[in-house]
Amino acid sequence: MRRTFHLHMAIVSTSIGIALVCYFPYFSQIISISYVNRKTNLIPIVLMILLVSPSIAKPLSEPAPQWPIILIKICIVQMYLSAGIQKLRKCGLKWLNGSILQSYFLNHYLWGDMTGSSRLAQNLTLCRILSILVLVFELTFWGILFVPTLTYVYAIGGILFHLGTHITMRINYLKYLMPVYTVFIADIVCRWLVAVRH
């Protein structure tokens, strides 16, 4: 049984290592496109954290250190916080009046014939509400580091946010972020697996 466990752990570690090595030749072909770079920059960082994590060599029933999960959360927090700060640096509090988001919706409608964007752009009040929600979401995401119970609320909010940008603007961050987002459910899944095994 122990030998089988070590074999599984070796396979997991090797798979993570191979994924990390393969990231660079795979994405180097398209990384010069700036929007792809922004979407994938967390992948090698998270893979590196997982590769050096001591818990990868322990059975699920044993307690594992929390620092790998916390480091991954910090990476995600940094991404959202920097996006919120960038909005304020570029637009200031004008971001909150909805007209900037409205112009983004119109731009994506003209660029990609996104009819959902056109409909949203016609309602300035809705654009104002969405602008405020996005900025509050991005600037307060760091709260998950200090109040872990907020993690699930922000994870669901993040998934809905990215689904919304994908549907209305064809900006699909989830394609690259979804594996990183699994950190939010790792604890629940591990507890469930331990309970099932006992």
Image: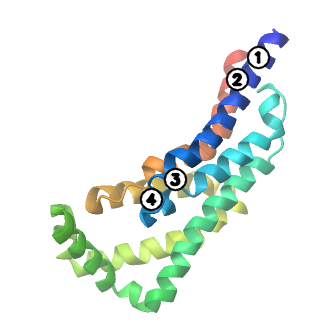
x 32%, y 83%: residue: 100
- What residue is disc 1 on? 7
- Which amino acid does the dot numbered 3 rest on? Ser
Residue 170 location, quadrant:
bottom left
Gap between marks 1 and 2 measured at Cα: 6 Å
Q: Earlier in the sequence, mark 4 or mark 3?
A: 3
x 81%, y 19%: residue: 6
Gap between marks 4 and 1 measured at Cα: 35 Å
Gap between marks 2 and 4 measured at Cα: 29 Å
User: Where is residue 153 drawn, in percent x and y?
Assistant: 54, 55
- Which amino acid does the dot numbered 4 rest on? Val
Callout 3: few (<14), some (14-19), or many (20+) C-alpha neighbours within 10 Å?
few
SS at mark 3? helix
- What residue is disc 4 on? 36
- Say above or below: 8 vs 87: above
- What residue is disc 3 on? 28
Gap between marks 4 and 3 measured at Cα: 10 Å
Callout 4: few (<14), some (14-19), or many (20+) C-alpha neighbours within 10 Å?
some
User: Where is residue 76 drawn, in percent x and y?
Assistant: 61, 59
Q: Earlier in the sequence, mark 2 or mark 4?
A: 2
- What residue is disc 2 on? 11
